[in-house]
Structure formats: C-alpha cells, structure tokens
C-alpha cells in the first residue's frame, strides 16, 4: 500500500539528500533525523510481532501496517528487492527497522511525530570509523573483578581478554554487535544488540558472570584432552580460532596446526600426524559424527593435506590417550571435528586464494530461521607452490574437496541434518629417467544426523551413513629395471551409530550406545619387474605380484559407561566396550576407567586406565606386497595420569605421563630409507617387520598463556620413547622422538588490525636404517670397469638422523569493509632455510678405476614462501 505518489516521494527524498531540513508549513518542529538515539518519536517504541521472509519493500510495508505508521519511500531505490527475513516477538519498531535495514544501501529518517522516510544511505555513513567498546567483567555474587575472561564480538575478528582489574577495551567500527564472554568456571554470557555509534565512540558494557556448575556430561574425565577453536566451561582452550587460522602452517590445514601440541609429531610432507609414537592410522577421526577413512589428499606423496577445510569447522578436540568407552577400534587417540552452526540472519560468504589452494564457504538460513545450510569448496594447486622451491616441478598434483550440510530444527523433535563430503585427487608425474605414475583417488560420504533432547535428561544422537572410496594407481619405469604397476581398490560402507545419555540423578549419568557397519572392499593388484642378468650364465627373470580379493566385513560395537560423582570434586567413569569384527573373526571386550579430581579451584587431576584394540582395516590390506589375508587385532593397555594447573598472570600449566604396552602386533611391510617413492613396494628399502609387541612411554609438559591483551604464547616439552619388540630386542619406532620442544608466540595491536605469529620446533633425530652396499665387479681391464651394485637395508632403525629444527613466521592483516572484511597474509615456512633430514641414501661413484661409497641426505621441505587473502562478506 503506497502512502504518497512516487512524485511526492521523489521531491521529499531530493530535499533530504541535499541536507535541507524538511519542515511542514503547519509544524515548525517537524525536522527529520536519522533513526537512532536522536529519533525520539514515541511511535518508534510501539511493539510489533511479525514472522516474515520477503523482499525488503514488503517487509517495511508490513511493519508500517502493524504499527500504524507512515513510511514513505521511492520504489526505485536500490535494495528494495533484497530478500529480508524478520523474526519479531513484541519488538519495538525502531529495532525492527534497524534489523531489516542493516547491511542495505538505505537508511530511515524520522520526524518528531513519527513519520518515516527511507532514503539512500549517504556515502559518508558507509565508511567505518574507529570507536571503542569497553567495559568490566565481574563476579555476579561477590562483585570481584575477573581477569582472563575472553571477550569476543561474534562473527568478527575482534576479541580480547579482561585485565587484572576486570576491564577490557576493543577498538571497533561503529555498528551493532553480539558480545560473548567466556571464562573457565563461569557460565558464558551473551549480550545481543550492543551498539557502538560514530557520535558516541566510547560505548561501555558491564558484564556479570555467575559461577558455572558443570553437569556430569560436561566434565572432562579424559587426560590428554585438547579443546580447539572454541572455549569451554570445563577446560582451558588449547588453540583458539584466531591461533589456528593465523599460526604458520602449510595450506591452512587443521591437521598441520595441531602437530604443535605435546605428544604429537609429524613429517613435513604429510598432514597425517603421530600421537605418542603411534602411527597416524591409530587415530580415530570423525566429522559431525561420521568416522572418516583415509581423510587425506595427495596420498602418493605422503598425504600432504586433509580433506576438511578449517573454515567450515566450528569446534574440534584432540585426545591423545586414555579415551573413554564410546570410542573404539583405535589404539592411540581421538580427533573429533564438528562443523560450525550456520548463521541464519543473512547469507554470509567467504572466499580465499593462496599459493596452495582456493576456497569458498557460504552459509545462511531458510524457513524463517528454523533451517540453515553451509557449503564449503576447496580446489588445490600444490604444483604452483612447488615451483617456488627446488623440488622437481614435473610433479603435477591436483585435488579438491566439497562439503555441504543442511539442518532443520524440529522443535521438541530435536534437529536433523543432512551432510555430504566429496574429495578427489589427480596426480601425474612423468620423467624419462624415473618412474612415471598416474593416479586418481576419490572418496564420497553422505550421512544423516538426528539429535534429540539436547536440554532434557535423555539425549540421543543417531548417525546413518553411506560412503565409498575408489583408488586407481598405475605406472611404469622403462629404463634400467622395467616396472609395471596396476592397482585398483574400492571400499563401500554403510553404517548406523546411536549414542544415548541419561541423567539418572544429579550424581549419576548413564551413557550407552552401538555402532554397526557393513563393509565390502575389492583389491585388484598386479606388478611386474624385470631383473636383468648380471652375466652371460644367468637369464633375465621377471618377478610378478598379483592379488585379487573381495573381502567383506560386519562390525558391531556396544558400549556402556556409567559416570558417578563420588564427591563434589571427584568424578569416576567406568566403561565396558564390546567389539565384534567378522573379517578377522574376533570378539573383544575392553574395560576402561577414567577419573577427574579437582582438589581446589584451578587444579585438576585426571587419570585413565584401559584396554584397547585395533583390527586391521578392511581397506588396509597390503596387497602390493602379495598379502591377501588379514592379521589379528593389535591390543594395548594404557595408563595415563595428568595434572592441569592455573597459575598467576593467566598462565596454564599441564604435566602428563603415560605408559602404553602393546601386544599382538601385526606383521607389516615398510620402507626404511626415508625417501618419498612413487612405487614404494618395489624399492630396495622395502622390508618385512615382524613385530611381537611394543611399549610407548613419555612425560609431557606445557605452559601457555592465551589471555594476554596483546600477546599469547605457549611452550611444550616431551620426553618420550616408542619401541617395538622385534627378534627378541626392543627397536625404536620410526617416529620415536626422545626429546621434542614446540613454541609459539603471537603479537596483535589493540585494534586487532593485524597479527604476527612465530612458531618453532626442535626434536631429536628420528631413527633410520643404514644401507649395506654389495659391489660385484663384472669386468676390470685397463680400459674398462663394469660393476653391479646391490643395496640392502641394514639393521632396522639402528642409527639416528641429526636433530630437526625449524622456525616459521606468518603476518596477517585485516581490513574492514562495509558488511565484511578482507584479510591478507604472508607466511614463510622454514624461515631460515634449515636443511632438515628425513633419510639417508648410500651413493656409489667412480673416480678413475676406484669405486667410492658415500652418503647423501634426503631433505625435508626447504624454505617455502606463501601468500594469500580471504574476503568475507
């Protein structure tokens, strides 16, 4: 319904745009002012109740109709066709208009009698000026100042911590913000619609926090727990989102970011990390409740990146030992990833480009905010980054991953979400003097989650999933020793997982659940190698390996885990787990016990004991080595004890010791030379390792401060031993690090306009296997020397490489835009170009009539500069 004609609107708008006050002839006080504190018309306080998602012109008309107000606008103004949602329950008109006009090119001007005109927003108001948002954080009961409280503006880069006197200050552009305050031991506080104005640049808020009483379900009873991305009421945050997104790392990958935590070690070339000496395959990884299988890109060069984009994640946690009964079929740890909750107020998009990859993430809502969606896509082009190093540029790796989810709030029926994840790799390498390879790796997952009763005594989570993996690898080597490989593998999986949690009483929590999977795999492997004769008496021969099997498996896991609060400060959880795995025909029962004791505020002791097992994965058959049957499950008994202490000046310290004894270890084939090989199964350094058991022991220490107003830092030290029982003696494992030190430091200004992060790592050299060389002279004359060289591995892991050291640096700059921000970063991995060693190779050279045997080092990543930007809008 139009209040005036278009001509009349145009006249009024032209007068307003020229900054001439509009006055009615009969009312000298009818002067229009922008909607805000200066608009004092009582009509703006009329409440409205409205639920609508429509073009802006229709939403404004509905507001005017319900509030009986006159709202005038020219129908040709920009932004009136923009889809605008509004959920208002007895909301004053002024706030309703501010919501629907936020982010649009329009503003509202109001007269003292309540007449409203929409006009184009002057360009001077589209610019952002620096203002201050400050305040104090206090205990709601005692009034005492609280230091170390994390104050963040939701959805922005602005965050800080309260000082010793409880005060905080943020330098921000003018606008409306949602303020969230968190502190260990206190209930989170969220303040909506906190307004910072250009004409009142020193906004102030008072925050009162009440001490939180943790429910039994929220208490962390597992030692070695590291919370990531978002803070928790129960434990200090190990790495915040700002730290994870700005610390130096290759490819902005969360796997590489967590490798700086105590007890975690990783190779430069691979994102797959080791937890307390165990292999990366001993880690249970889940995304929104789905167990991930082989979640890595570029498998031919060690799995350089994960298939999960950090920009799509909301929370994450890493448990490095002593995990409770709901997780099984793994020996070392649990890595839990949860994607972010999409915002529903409007569509938000983030795009970014770096030398490693490009990425785009978008999120929004539907059905008046009851539904939401999130989409993330990321193509990679590592070959561009390799051209900046001395690494061979004939490698052409390409990859991408795509994630999408849509969720809907069913009210009392809980919430349901549909997820999809697709990842694909294409790898090509061709060079006349070396093996050529062509490979394609694809993985597809779709799963449905249903969460019921999040705020009730009985909570249920159901996950139904389908997944598949398709791998193809082939290649040949035409020179010296002709080689041919064809390797095709597939995995199909269907799964159903249900987890129940019931608060029987304030001091008793009962958890139970099941996890059922049906899997089928196929292996079609063939390789042929021609071995040339060394003399005329021996014929050439061809060694071939062929495996064609199609195994199937049914897996069923059941667990029961009652948790009891014995004392207000002492909580125990006893767990019992049953695993049935059909393809190895095993049934395994695993008892576990976890405890958390808080003798005083700021001090927490956690302990764990348990038995764990891991079956050989249906997709983990080493068909390339001629293996066509599965080995028995490996088993381990773990004991972990840790203490976490809050220290003065906002410093958190933790000390943890662990002991893991392994039994029933499987035979495996490994390469011991340390090089990255395109055909590892055909290399001279491929050996069979018959392990009987093993033992992992260690002591970890960490000090960190993340609540500094300008800086944060952490330093960790680990003393560890990881050894296997082989041939009657204890042999160090390939990732055994006797000593390891990680340190990180970052600096930011009060405006949070930039962030400088520096990280360093040092650890003892890894064990390696020396090579023995046999030289067979075939011809020796005054004019001719012909000999044959045979390399063979020596004693397994009997020597050590020299120690590893590396320093990385990254600078990130933020620029605010109208409705978003742009961030630029520059990073140098291995800042000082340190030549770190990952293996040794024995060389044989001829000098005249002499044969000289030497040793060369195989290096890790050289200095690697990286740059990129991200635009959020």
Image: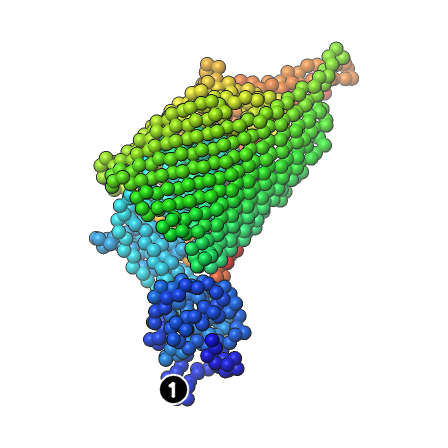
Instruction: Residue under label 1, please give it.
Output: 28
- Could you tell whether 138 is left or right of 761 in the image? left
Q: Name the quadrant containing residue 688.
A: top right
What colour-coding does the image apply? Answer: rainbow
Q: Residue at x 35, y 46 (%)?
A: 454
Q: Position of residue 48 (x, y in %)?
A: 36, 68
Between 841 and 357, the one lying in front of the other is 357
Q: Residue at x 37, y 80 (%)?
A: 113
Q: Please say whether residue 389 is visible from this viewpoint.
A: no
Between 461 and 531, the one lying in front of the other is 461
- Could you tell whether 313 is left or right of 301 in the image? left
The relative height of residue 870 versus residue 648 in the rendered view (above or below) is: below
Task: Tell me if mark 1 has few (under 14), some (14-19) or many (20+) residues whose alpha carbon lies within 10 angstroms of its own.
Answer: few
Q: Secondary structure at mark 1?
A: loop
Q: Please say whether residue 402 is visible from this viewpoint.
A: yes
Q: Name the quadrant containing residue 838.
A: top right
Q: Position of residue 846 (x, y in %)?
A: 69, 21
Between 845 and 737, the one lying in front of the other is 737
The relative height of residue 724 versus residue 463 in the rendered view (above or below) is: above
């Amino acid at each position: 319904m139009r209040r005036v004609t278009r001509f009349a609107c145009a006249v009024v708008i032209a007068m307003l745009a020229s900054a001439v006050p509009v006055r009615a002839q009969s009312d000298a006080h009818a002067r229009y002012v922008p909607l805000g504190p200066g608009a004092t018309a009582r009509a703006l306080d009329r409440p409205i109740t409205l639920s609508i998602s429509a073009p802006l012109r229709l939403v404004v008309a509905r507001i005017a109709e319900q509030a009986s107000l006159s709202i005038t606008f020219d129908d040709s103004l920009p932004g009136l066709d923009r889809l605008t949602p509004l959920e208002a329950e007895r909301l004053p008109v002024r706030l309703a208009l501010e919501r629907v006009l936020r982010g649009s090119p329009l503003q509202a001007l109001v007269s003292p009698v309540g007449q409203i005109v929409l006009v184009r927003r002057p360009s001077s108001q589209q610019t952002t000026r620096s203002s201050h948002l400050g305040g104090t954080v206090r205990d709601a009961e005692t009034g005492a100042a609280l230091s170390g409280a994390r104050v963040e503006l939701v959805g922005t880069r602005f965050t800080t911590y309260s000082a010793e006197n409880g005060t905080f200050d943020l330098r921000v552009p003018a606008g409306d913000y949602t303020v969230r305050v968190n502190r260990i031991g206190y209930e989170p506080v969220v303040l909506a619609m906190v307004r910072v104005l250009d004409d009142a640049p020193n906004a102030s808020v008072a925050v009162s926090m009440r001490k939180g009483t943790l429910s039994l379900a929220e208490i962390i009873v597992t030692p070695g727990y590291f919370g990531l991305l978002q803070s928790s009421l129960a434990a200090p945050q190990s790495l915040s989102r700002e730290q994870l997104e700005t610390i130096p790392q290759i490819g902005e990958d969360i796997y590489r970011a967590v490798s700086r935590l105590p007890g975690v070690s990783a190779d430069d070339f691979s994102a797959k990390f080791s937890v307390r000496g165990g292999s990366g395959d001993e880690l249970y990884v889940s995304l929104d409740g789905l167990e991930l299988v082989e979640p890595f890109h570029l498998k031919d060069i060690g799995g350089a990146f994960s298939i999960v984009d950090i920009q799509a994640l909301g929370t994450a946690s890493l448990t490095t030992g002593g995990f409770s009964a709901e997780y099984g079929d793994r020996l070392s740890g649990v890595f839990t990833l949860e994607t972010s909750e999409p915002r529903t107020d409007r569509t938000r998009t983030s795009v970014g480009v770096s030398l490693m990859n490009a990425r785009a993430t978008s999120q929004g809502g539907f059905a008046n905010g009851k539904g939401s969606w999130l989409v993330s896509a990321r193509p990679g082009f590592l070959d561009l980054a390799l051209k900046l190093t001395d690494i061979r540029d004939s490698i052409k790796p390409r990859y991408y991953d795509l994630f999408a989810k849509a969720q809907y709030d069913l009210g009392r029926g809980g919430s349901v979400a549909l997820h999809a994840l697709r990842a694909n790799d294409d790898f090509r390498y061709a060079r006349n003097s070396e093996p050529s390879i062509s490979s394609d790796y694809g993985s597809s997952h779709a799963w449905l989650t249903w969460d019921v009763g999040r705020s009730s005594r009985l909570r249920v989570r159901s996950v139904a999933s389908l997944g598949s993996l398709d791998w193809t690898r082939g290649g040949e080597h035409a020179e010296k020793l002709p080689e041919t490989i064809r390797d095709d593998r597939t995995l199909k999986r269907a799964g159903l997982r249900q987890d129940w949690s019931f608060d029987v009483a304030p001091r008793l929590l009962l958890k139970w659940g099941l996890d059922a999977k049906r899997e089928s795999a196929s292996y079609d492997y063939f390789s042929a190698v021609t071995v040339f004769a060394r003399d005329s008496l021996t014929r050439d021969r061809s060694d071939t390996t062929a495996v064609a099997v199609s195994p199937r498996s049914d897996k069923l896991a059941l667990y029961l885990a009652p948790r009891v609060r014995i004392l207000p400060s002492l909580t125990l959880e006893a767990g019992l787990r049953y695993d049935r795995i059909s393809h190895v025909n095993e049934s395994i029962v695993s008892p576990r016990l976890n405890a958390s004791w808080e003798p005083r505020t700021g001090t927490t002791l956690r302990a764990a004991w348990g038995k764990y097992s891991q079956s050989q994965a249906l997709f983990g058959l080493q068909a390339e080595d001629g293996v066509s049957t599965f080995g028995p499950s490996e088993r381990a008994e773990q004991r972990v004890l840790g203490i976490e202490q809050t220290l003065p000046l906002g410093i958190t310290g933790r000390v943890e010791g662990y002991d893991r004894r392994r039994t029933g270890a499987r035979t495996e084939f490994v390469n011991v030379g340390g090089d990255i090989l395109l055909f590892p199964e055909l290399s001279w350094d491929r050996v069979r390792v018959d392990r009987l058991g093993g033992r992992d022991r260690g002591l970890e220490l960490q000090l960190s401060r993340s609540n500094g107003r300008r800086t944060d830092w952490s330093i960790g030290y680990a003393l560890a031993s990881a050894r296997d029982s082989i041939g009657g003696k204890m042999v160090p494992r390939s990732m055994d690090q006797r000593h390891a030190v990680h340190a990180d430091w970052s600096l930011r200004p009060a405006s949070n306009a930039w962030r400088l992060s520096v990280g360093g790592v040092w650890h003892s050299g890894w064990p390696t296997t020396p090579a023995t060389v046999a030289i067979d002279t075939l011809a020796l004359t005054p004019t001719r020397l012909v000999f044959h060289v045979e390399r063979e591995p020596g004693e397994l892991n009997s020597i050590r490489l020299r120690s590893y050291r590396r320093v990385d640096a990254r600078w990130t700059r933020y620029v605010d835009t109208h409705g978003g921000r742009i961030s630029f970063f520059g990073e140098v991995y291995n800042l000082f170009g340190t030549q770190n060693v990952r293996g040794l190779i024995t060389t044989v050279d001829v000098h005249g009539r002499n044969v000289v045997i030497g040793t060369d080092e195989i290096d890790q990543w050289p200095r690697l500069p990286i740059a990129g930007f991200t635009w959020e809008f």
